[in-house]
Image (tube, rainbow, N blue to C red):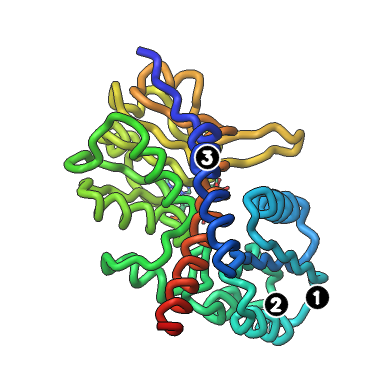
Protein backbone atom coordinates (compact mmCIF):
# COMPACT_ATOMS: atom_id res chain seq x y z
CA UNK A 1 0.00 0.00 0.00
CA UNK A 2 1.24 3.49 -0.79
CA UNK A 3 -0.39 6.23 1.23
CA UNK A 4 -2.39 9.06 -0.25
CA UNK A 5 -0.57 12.35 0.32
CA UNK A 6 -2.35 15.07 2.29
CA UNK A 7 -1.09 18.13 0.44
CA UNK A 8 -0.95 21.08 2.86
CA UNK A 9 0.11 23.48 0.11
CA UNK A 10 -2.98 22.76 -1.99
CA UNK A 11 -5.34 22.91 0.99
CA UNK A 12 -3.76 26.17 2.14
CA UNK A 13 -4.16 27.66 -1.36
CA UNK A 14 -7.88 26.85 -1.32
CA UNK A 15 -8.32 28.38 2.12
CA UNK A 16 -6.39 31.49 1.08
CA UNK A 17 -8.85 32.21 -1.74
CA UNK A 18 -11.56 32.39 0.91
CA UNK A 19 -9.37 34.45 3.27
CA UNK A 20 -8.61 37.04 0.56
CA UNK A 21 -12.33 37.32 -0.28
CA UNK A 22 -13.27 37.79 3.40
CA UNK A 23 -10.47 40.36 3.88
CA UNK A 24 -11.69 42.34 0.85
CA UNK A 25 -15.29 42.26 2.12
CA UNK A 26 -14.20 43.45 5.57
CA UNK A 27 -12.20 46.30 4.02
CA UNK A 28 -15.22 47.34 1.93
CA UNK A 29 -17.20 47.50 5.18
CA UNK A 30 -14.59 49.75 6.79
CA UNK A 31 -12.67 47.20 8.89
CA UNK A 32 -9.37 46.20 7.26
CA UNK A 33 -8.12 43.15 9.20
CA UNK A 34 -4.84 43.92 10.95
CA UNK A 35 -2.12 41.64 12.33
CA UNK A 36 0.83 42.80 14.46
CA UNK A 37 3.84 40.51 14.82
CA UNK A 38 6.49 41.23 17.45
CA UNK A 39 9.97 39.77 17.20
CA UNK A 40 12.52 40.26 19.98
CA UNK A 41 16.09 39.24 19.18
CA UNK A 42 17.79 38.20 15.96
CA UNK A 43 17.21 34.44 15.68
CA UNK A 44 17.49 33.60 11.98
CA UNK A 45 14.79 30.90 12.21
CA UNK A 46 12.34 33.26 13.97
CA UNK A 47 13.08 35.93 11.36
CA UNK A 48 12.16 33.50 8.55
CA UNK A 49 8.88 32.55 10.29
CA UNK A 50 7.99 36.20 10.89
CA UNK A 51 8.78 37.28 7.32
CA UNK A 52 6.67 34.39 5.96
CA UNK A 53 3.74 35.44 8.14
CA UNK A 54 4.06 39.07 7.05
CA UNK A 55 4.31 38.14 3.36
CA UNK A 56 1.27 35.84 3.56
CA UNK A 57 -0.78 38.48 5.41
CA UNK A 58 -0.01 41.19 2.88
CA UNK A 59 -0.82 38.88 -0.03
CA UNK A 60 -4.29 38.31 1.49
CA UNK A 61 -5.04 42.03 1.95
CA UNK A 62 -4.42 41.92 5.70
CA UNK A 63 -2.81 45.06 7.16
CA UNK A 64 0.44 43.71 8.59
CA UNK A 65 2.72 45.38 11.13
CA UNK A 66 6.09 43.92 12.06
CA UNK A 67 7.77 45.26 15.19
CA UNK A 68 11.40 44.17 15.65
CA UNK A 69 13.37 44.78 18.83
CA UNK A 70 16.92 43.99 19.92
CA UNK A 71 17.53 40.96 22.15
CA UNK A 72 18.04 43.26 25.18
CA UNK A 73 14.58 44.86 24.82
CA UNK A 74 13.14 44.96 28.34
CA UNK A 75 10.11 43.01 29.51
CA UNK A 76 8.48 46.25 30.68
CA UNK A 77 8.91 47.87 27.28
CA UNK A 78 7.50 44.77 25.56
CA UNK A 79 4.46 44.76 27.86
CA UNK A 80 3.92 48.44 27.03
CA UNK A 81 3.99 47.67 23.30
CA UNK A 82 1.44 44.88 23.77
CA UNK A 83 -0.79 47.21 25.76
CA UNK A 84 -0.63 49.79 22.94
CA UNK A 85 -1.52 47.13 20.34
CA UNK A 86 -4.37 45.87 22.57
CA UNK A 87 -5.86 49.36 22.36
CA UNK A 88 -5.13 49.90 18.65
CA UNK A 89 -8.41 49.56 16.67
CA UNK A 90 -6.49 48.84 13.43
CA UNK A 91 -5.02 45.65 14.96
CA UNK A 92 -7.20 42.53 15.36
CA UNK A 93 -4.46 39.99 15.99
CA UNK A 94 -1.22 40.16 18.00
CA UNK A 95 1.46 37.52 17.73
CA UNK A 96 4.65 37.48 19.78
CA UNK A 97 7.18 35.23 18.08
CA UNK A 98 8.56 32.62 20.48
CA UNK A 99 11.02 31.85 21.94
CA UNK A 100 11.65 35.12 23.75
CA UNK A 101 15.07 35.96 25.25
CA UNK A 102 15.54 34.36 28.72
CA UNK A 103 15.21 37.65 30.68
CA UNK A 104 11.57 37.95 29.51
CA UNK A 105 8.78 35.96 31.22
CA UNK A 106 6.95 34.35 28.28
CA UNK A 107 3.83 33.52 30.34
CA UNK A 108 3.50 37.12 31.49
CA UNK A 109 3.85 38.40 27.91
CA UNK A 110 1.28 35.97 26.49
CA UNK A 111 -1.11 36.76 29.35
CA UNK A 112 -0.84 40.47 28.49
CA UNK A 113 -2.36 39.97 25.02
CA UNK A 114 -6.11 40.68 24.99
CA UNK A 115 -7.79 37.26 24.58
CA UNK A 116 -9.77 38.42 21.52
CA UNK A 117 -6.51 39.49 19.80
CA UNK A 118 -4.59 36.34 20.80
CA UNK A 119 -4.59 34.83 17.30
CA UNK A 120 -1.97 32.22 18.27
CA UNK A 121 -4.34 31.03 21.05
CA UNK A 122 -1.54 30.73 23.63
CA UNK A 123 -3.31 32.82 26.32
CA UNK A 124 -4.61 30.69 29.24
CA UNK A 125 -8.11 32.10 28.78
CA UNK A 126 -8.27 30.85 25.21
CA UNK A 127 -6.62 27.55 26.21
CA UNK A 128 -9.25 27.16 28.96
CA UNK A 129 -12.12 27.96 26.58
CA UNK A 130 -10.79 25.33 24.17
CA UNK A 131 -10.45 22.81 27.01
CA UNK A 132 -14.03 23.39 28.12
CA UNK A 133 -15.44 23.05 24.61
CA UNK A 134 -16.20 26.73 23.96
CA UNK A 135 -13.26 27.82 21.80
CA UNK A 136 -13.22 31.46 20.66
CA UNK A 137 -9.90 31.11 18.83
CA UNK A 138 -8.20 27.85 17.87
CA UNK A 139 -4.42 27.34 18.04
CA UNK A 140 -3.02 27.53 14.51
CA UNK A 141 -1.12 24.24 14.17
CA UNK A 142 -3.78 21.89 15.59
CA UNK A 143 -6.47 23.89 13.76
CA UNK A 144 -4.55 23.31 10.52
CA UNK A 145 -4.23 19.60 11.29
CA UNK A 146 -7.99 19.38 11.87
CA UNK A 147 -8.57 20.95 8.44
CA UNK A 148 -6.20 18.38 6.92
CA UNK A 149 -8.07 15.52 8.60
CA UNK A 150 -11.42 16.93 7.50
CA UNK A 151 -10.15 17.06 3.91
CA UNK A 152 -9.81 13.27 3.62
CA UNK A 153 -12.38 10.54 3.52
CA UNK A 154 -11.60 9.16 6.98
CA UNK A 155 -13.95 9.34 9.98
CA UNK A 156 -12.57 11.11 13.06
CA UNK A 157 -15.53 10.16 15.23
CA UNK A 158 -14.79 6.86 16.95
CA UNK A 159 -11.20 6.73 15.68
CA UNK A 160 -8.31 6.12 18.08
CA UNK A 161 -6.01 9.14 17.75
CA UNK A 162 -2.53 8.87 19.21
CA UNK A 163 -0.64 12.13 19.68
CA UNK A 164 3.10 11.85 20.21
CA UNK A 165 4.16 15.08 21.93
CA UNK A 166 2.34 16.93 24.68
CA UNK A 167 3.34 20.59 24.35
CA UNK A 168 0.98 23.45 25.16
CA UNK A 169 1.04 24.71 21.57
CA UNK A 170 0.65 21.45 19.65
CA UNK A 171 0.08 18.15 21.51
CA UNK A 172 -2.35 19.20 24.24
CA UNK A 173 -4.67 21.43 22.14
CA UNK A 174 -4.53 18.80 19.36
CA UNK A 175 -5.82 16.23 21.86
CA UNK A 176 -8.66 18.54 22.93
CA UNK A 177 -9.74 19.25 19.36
CA UNK A 178 -9.70 15.58 18.37
CA UNK A 179 -11.53 14.60 21.57
CA UNK A 180 -14.22 17.19 20.81
CA UNK A 181 -14.47 15.75 17.28
CA UNK A 182 -15.33 12.37 18.82
CA UNK A 183 -11.98 10.56 18.72
CA UNK A 184 -10.56 8.44 21.55
CA UNK A 185 -7.23 9.90 22.57
CA UNK A 186 -3.83 8.70 23.74
CA UNK A 187 -1.14 11.33 24.41
CA UNK A 188 2.49 10.18 24.56
CA UNK A 189 5.49 12.08 25.89
CA UNK A 190 9.22 11.53 26.34
CA UNK A 191 8.59 9.25 29.33
CA UNK A 192 6.13 6.95 27.54
CA UNK A 193 7.15 3.31 27.90
CA UNK A 194 7.08 1.38 24.63
CA UNK A 195 6.04 4.19 22.28
CA UNK A 196 5.56 1.73 19.40
CA UNK A 197 2.89 -0.18 21.37
CA UNK A 198 0.78 2.98 21.45
CA UNK A 199 1.47 4.19 17.90
CA UNK A 200 0.51 0.78 16.46
CA UNK A 201 -2.97 1.23 17.96
CA UNK A 202 -3.48 4.55 16.18
CA UNK A 203 -6.06 5.03 13.45
CA UNK A 204 -4.85 8.65 13.40
CA UNK A 205 -1.25 9.31 14.42
CA UNK A 206 -0.05 12.87 15.04
CA UNK A 207 3.72 13.17 15.52
CA UNK A 208 4.85 16.42 17.18
CA UNK A 209 8.10 15.85 19.05
CA UNK A 210 10.92 17.47 17.05
CA UNK A 211 12.78 14.11 17.27
CA UNK A 212 14.20 13.18 13.89
CA UNK A 213 12.48 10.16 12.26
CA UNK A 214 11.12 8.94 15.59
CA UNK A 215 8.12 7.37 13.81
CA UNK A 216 9.17 4.32 11.76
CA UNK A 217 7.19 2.08 9.42
CA UNK A 218 6.92 -0.78 11.94
CA UNK A 219 5.18 1.58 14.38
CA UNK A 220 2.20 2.18 12.08
CA UNK A 221 -1.13 0.35 11.82
CA UNK A 222 -1.64 -0.44 8.10
CA UNK A 223 -3.96 2.14 6.55
CA UNK A 224 -3.60 4.68 9.38
CA UNK A 225 -3.59 8.45 8.88
CA UNK A 226 -0.17 9.90 9.76
CA UNK A 227 0.31 13.64 10.27
CA UNK A 228 3.88 14.85 10.66
CA UNK A 229 4.05 18.10 12.63
CA UNK A 230 7.72 17.89 13.57
CA UNK A 231 10.19 19.94 11.61
CA UNK A 232 13.84 20.59 12.23
CA UNK A 233 16.81 21.81 10.19
CA UNK A 234 20.21 20.24 10.82
CA UNK A 235 23.61 21.96 10.79
CA UNK A 236 23.84 21.45 6.99
CA UNK A 237 20.46 23.07 6.40
CA UNK A 238 18.74 19.74 5.64
CA UNK A 239 15.09 19.56 6.70
CA UNK A 240 14.07 16.66 8.99
CA UNK A 241 10.78 15.70 10.50
CA UNK A 242 9.31 13.24 13.02
CA UNK A 243 8.20 10.65 10.46
CA UNK A 244 10.42 8.39 8.36
CA UNK A 245 8.35 9.41 5.33
CA UNK A 246 9.70 7.10 2.55
CA UNK A 247 9.06 3.94 4.60
CA UNK A 248 5.98 5.02 6.56
CA UNK A 249 4.16 5.98 3.34
CA UNK A 250 4.31 2.33 2.29
CA UNK A 251 2.22 1.30 5.34
CA UNK A 252 -0.04 4.29 6.07
CA UNK A 253 -3.32 5.05 4.29
CA UNK A 254 -2.79 8.83 4.31
CA UNK A 255 0.31 10.83 5.15
CA UNK A 256 1.33 14.49 5.29
CA UNK A 257 4.76 15.41 3.91
CA UNK A 258 7.40 17.81 5.23
CA UNK A 259 7.72 20.32 3.66
CA UNK A 260 4.30 21.00 2.16
CA UNK A 261 2.17 19.54 4.96
CA UNK A 262 1.39 21.12 8.32
CA UNK A 263 3.70 24.15 7.85
CA UNK A 264 1.66 26.04 5.20
CA UNK A 265 -1.54 25.16 7.07
CA UNK A 266 -0.25 26.71 10.32
CA UNK A 267 0.39 30.09 8.67
CA UNK A 268 -2.95 29.90 6.87
CA UNK A 269 -4.86 29.28 10.10
CA UNK A 270 -3.15 32.31 11.64
CA UNK A 271 -4.66 34.36 8.81
CA UNK A 272 -8.06 32.69 9.34
CA UNK A 273 -7.91 33.59 13.05
CA UNK A 274 -7.06 37.21 12.19
CA UNK A 275 -9.99 37.42 9.76
CA UNK A 276 -12.35 35.87 12.32
CA UNK A 277 -11.18 38.39 14.97
CA UNK A 278 -11.82 41.27 12.53
CA UNK A 279 -15.25 39.86 11.59
CA UNK A 280 -16.21 39.78 15.29
CA UNK A 281 -15.14 43.43 15.63
CA UNK A 282 -17.24 44.36 12.61
CA UNK A 283 -20.27 42.58 14.13
CA UNK A 284 -19.76 44.50 17.39
CA UNK A 285 -19.53 47.77 15.45
CA UNK A 286 -22.72 47.02 13.50
CA UNK A 287 -24.54 46.06 16.73
CA UNK A 288 -23.44 49.29 18.39
CA UNK A 289 -24.73 51.32 15.42
CA UNK A 290 -28.21 49.74 15.61
P1 LIG B 1 8.16 20.86 22.37
O1 LIG B 1 7.54 21.95 23.16
O2 LIG B 1 9.63 20.63 22.45
O3 LIG B 1 7.44 19.50 22.82
C1 LIG B 1 7.87 18.28 22.33
C2 LIG B 1 7.01 17.20 22.92
O4 LIG B 1 7.48 15.95 22.41
C3 LIG B 1 7.08 17.09 24.45
O5 LIG B 1 5.81 16.84 24.99
C4 LIG B 1 8.02 15.92 24.68
O6 LIG B 1 7.76 15.17 25.85
C5 LIG B 1 7.69 15.05 23.48
N1 LIG B 1 8.79 14.15 23.17
C6 LIG B 1 10.09 14.45 23.03
N2 LIG B 1 10.80 13.31 22.78
C7 LIG B 1 9.92 12.31 22.77
C8 LIG B 1 10.04 10.91 22.58
N3 LIG B 1 11.22 10.34 22.38
N4 LIG B 1 8.93 10.16 22.64
C9 LIG B 1 7.71 10.74 22.86
N5 LIG B 1 7.53 12.06 23.05
C10 LIG B 1 8.64 12.83 23.00
O7 LIG B 1 7.84 20.97 20.85
P2 LIG B 1 6.58 21.62 20.06
O8 LIG B 1 6.65 23.08 20.14
O9 LIG B 1 5.33 20.91 20.43
O10 LIG B 1 6.97 21.20 18.57
C11 LIG B 1 7.12 19.84 18.21
C12 LIG B 1 7.65 19.77 16.80
O11 LIG B 1 6.69 20.34 15.93
C13 LIG B 1 8.95 20.57 16.56
O12 LIG B 1 9.70 19.90 15.59
C14 LIG B 1 8.44 21.89 16.00
O13 LIG B 1 9.40 22.53 15.18
C15 LIG B 1 7.27 21.39 15.17
N6 LIG B 1 6.24 22.39 14.93
C16 LIG B 1 5.89 22.58 13.64
C17 LIG B 1 4.91 23.49 13.32
C18 LIG B 1 4.53 23.68 11.91
O14 LIG B 1 3.80 24.61 11.60
N7 LIG B 1 4.96 22.81 11.01
C19 LIG B 1 4.28 24.22 14.34
C20 LIG B 1 4.65 23.99 15.67
C21 LIG B 1 5.64 23.06 15.95
P3 LIG B 1 7.88 15.78 27.34
O15 LIG B 1 6.59 16.53 27.53
O16 LIG B 1 8.01 14.58 28.20
O17 LIG B 1 9.09 16.66 27.33
179 in relation to 231, above or below: below
Residue at x 34%, y 23% (from the top left corner): 253
Q: Earlier in the sequence, mark 1 or mark 2?
A: 1
Label 3 to label 2, Cα distance in Å?
A: 36 Å
1 and 2 marks in contact (CB < 8 Å): yes
Q: Earlier in the sequence, mark 3 or mark 2?
A: 3
Crowd around label 1: few <14 · some 14–19 · many ≥20 (10 Å):
few
| Closer to us: 136 or 211 | 136
138 in relation to 186, above or below: below
Q: Earlier in the sequence, mark 1 or mark 3?
A: 3
At mark 3, the secondary structure is helix
Q: How far across and how far down the image is residue 131, in percent?
A: 31, 66
Mark 2 lies on residue: 103
| Closer to us: 267 or 128 | 267
271 in relation to 198, above or below: below
User: Which image quadrant is residue 134 in?
Assistant: bottom left
User: Which image quadrant is residue 31 in?
Assistant: bottom right
3 and 2 marks in contact (CB < 8 Å): no
Residue 72: mark in rendering: 1
Amino acid sequence: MTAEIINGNLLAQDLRVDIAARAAKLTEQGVTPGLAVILVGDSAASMVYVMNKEKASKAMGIHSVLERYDADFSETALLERIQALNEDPAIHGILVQLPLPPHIDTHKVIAAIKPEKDVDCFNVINAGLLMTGRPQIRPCTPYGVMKMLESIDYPITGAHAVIVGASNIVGKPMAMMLLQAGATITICNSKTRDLAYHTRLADILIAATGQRNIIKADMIKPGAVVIDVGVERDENGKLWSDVDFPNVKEVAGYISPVPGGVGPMTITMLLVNTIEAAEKKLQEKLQAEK
